[in-house]
Amino acid sequence: MKKSRRDFNNLLIRGAGSFVLAGPFNAARATLGPITPNQKLGIVLVGLGSYSTYQLAPALQQTQYCYLAGIVTGTPEKEKTWSDKYDIPKENIYNYENFDKISENPDIHIVYVVLPNSMHAEFSIRAANAGKHVICEKPMAMNVSECNAIIDACKKAKVKLGVGYRLHSEPYTRELKSIVHKKDFGEVRYVTADAGYYSGSNPGQWRLNKALAGGGALMNMGVYSIQSAIYGSGMNPVSVSAQEFSTRPEYFKDTDETITAQFEFPNGATGNIMTSHNVNINRHYSNFENGWVELNPANHYGPLAGGSSDNRNWDFPHERQQKLQMDDFAKHILHDAPNLIPGEMGKRDMIIVEAIYQSIKEGGKKIPLDLGNMGL
Amino acid sequence: MKKSRRDFNNLLIRGAGSFVLAGPFNAARATLGPITPNQKLGIVLVGLGSYSTYQLAPALQQTQYCYLAGIVTGTPEKEKTWSDKYDIPKENIYNYENFDKISENPDIHIVYVVLPNSMHAEFSIRAANAGKHVICEKPMAMNVSECNAIIDACKKAKVKLGVGYRLHSEPYTRELKSIVHKKDFGEVRYVTADAGYYSGSNPGQWRLNKALAGGGALMNMGVYSIQSAIYGSGMNPVSVSAQEFSTRPEYFKDTDETITAQFEFPNGATGNIMTSHNVNINRHYSNFENGWVELNPANHYGPLAGGSSDNRNWDFPHERQQKLQMDDFAKHILHDAPNLIPGEMGKRDMIIVEAIYQSIKEGGKKIPLDLGNMGL
């Protein structure tokens, strides 16, 4: 039933112009509202931590193609705060137990999973099984096997899947990607990216708990460095070696504090990345045959700053990256625009994460990677 | 005889004010000119390649405490060109065979060895044995054992020894060193440096010949990255791991093309460097508890450019770095000013170079370093 609803929706959504139809039948609700290509899609945020609170919810007040339709929270007090603040109807508020009933809710088109990493797979799969499109926050999951399970569930349910790599919608990053793609400065020869922050003095935070985060700096900021190296070169690496560094083992009991890694790319270019929970840093640099591009900051919430060797002034208007990201995903659903951040991209990065941990385990050994064009 | 001449010179040079004496006795010449603390010391350049031609000789037209007194060349045509251009008397022109007769020449106080790396040790030692102070271009020698031989020869001959790391006299670098030393931004947490250039399409150049250069990018530009990591952190590393990358093995037949290396520092900070003969790059970045410093370019002939997180405007006047460097060395001799670039610094860097090659040979294994404060 759910499946046929999605299929029918897709038909409608991909239909022409402002043609309006009554929504498809859903087992649990007699009628659904009309759906059109001009409609704003309803997003439900699963997990109301700081990223939902200070980034996603405010961004959803600015989005053109989607809006904050509902919330899923395990904290009853948040139900009232959020519904008051964002005018969320009671029937669009869920907890982790009754979450699956979301399948019966025609207001919700997209489930955005903003939970600790260990819960990404479970809730992405439950969302897919509920017939909803899925955005899964980065890192996509705890490991490659979970990424596969999410991708399979979304394929099976015929729903769209995006990963929360907001920078693919961000203009500085898009400009960098365009320069790389069009070879404005020739071939890439070297790419380096450092991403980290000082994690302070709260050892109880979930990002330092391996059972919840799957790893430390690498799983959190390291995926930005990996992303940077790949979109900053336009290629997937063919090998990686890596090293781990520790300054405060008594604080970072459970997870990696600082990691460096080196990539070989198919054209012979070298990649050199660092990530840390001990260093405030946020930089990207791509070096080409005939020039360079630098972004600094490169991956925080913006405004970003960038420059290139041709002295062009990089001065793009700042908009909330999450607004752009969620609108791009909604346009993918509504208008068949490209999916800028497909699940395969998140899975590819997790393959690299696993190879980095393996290299560290093996004393810095070079680990071959066979990624083809996955996620490019 | 030579020894007593040096000792006597030192006595004179360290004497007060403008007190003038006839020079000490030299076996080969009946009289030497007067030497005073205000005197300009005579420098002889050994090897008239592009660095001597375009950097050192022009710099010696601007120096206050030393001047271009002579040349040593194996190319007879250069004798005339140089003596015409710089008004160098015939008796101050040597070739590699009669070089040792320089001991008899009272005009020459300092021998600056600007030859391919494989000849650094031989000519530095011959210069010391001739009773002359020595500046040895970087990298100091082919290996640690040669560095030891140079240091020993200079000690035995009681002459001063400096290495050609011009940046220690350069104001941007000195400002960085001062910030690190005074902990203006707190402890260093991360330091990264990339130094390289595209070596073009001349496979015959001596820098690509292992017998002459001792190695490739690492021996040439890599020592800048090593230097950067050390003065950008204020510490000697306690371990290093390294990786080698190759894009054009048919061109770089004999020497390393691109190398990355990671350092651990005593306070737990991480260092991450890259050097290449395939990438035009020249950057330094030090990250501290409460700020950062960036130099870009960081180690070319200048003007350099820099900035720091406190928004201070780094705008130092540009002077030829080699002028500043040679004057600082002359002041070390004349006025007992500190030796900014002692032989131990060059030796320390060569210990690190050897450890980097060893790590690469052992598949990226972490190599412990026991440097103490050598060269700091």
Image (tube, coloured by chain):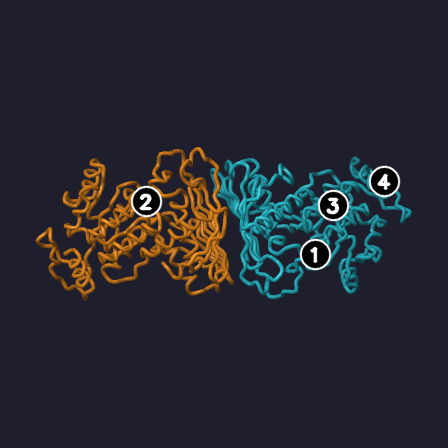
Chain colours: A orange, B cyan
Please tell me whether mark 1 sits on a helix, a strand or a loop: loop
Residue linked to disc 3: B149
Q: Which residue is mark 2?
A: A117
On whether disc 1 and disc 2 are found on a single subunit, the reply is no
Query: Which chain is disc 4 placed on?
Result: B
**To which residue does mark 4 refer?**
B4
User: Are marks 3 and 4 in one subunit?
Assistant: yes
Identify the mark nearer the N-term, 4 or 1.
4
- Report the chain holding disc 2: A
- Residue A295 on image: x %, y %: 44, 52
Task: Name the residue that disc number 1 marks.
Answer: B116
Left or right side of B374 for A42: left
Q: Residues within 10 Å of mark 2 (few under 14, many from 20)?
A: many
Q: Is residue B165 visible?
A: yes
Q: Amino acid at mark 1?
A: Pro
The vertical placement of B168 against A148, above or below, is above
The chain letter under disc 1 is B
Could you give the CA–CA distance between mark 4 and mark 2, rounded to whole angstroms? 75 Å
Q: CA distance from mark 4 to mark 1?
A: 32 Å
Residue B4 percent location from the top left of the image: 85, 40
- Asked whether the beta carbons under mark 1 and mark 2 sit within 8 Å of each other, the answer is no
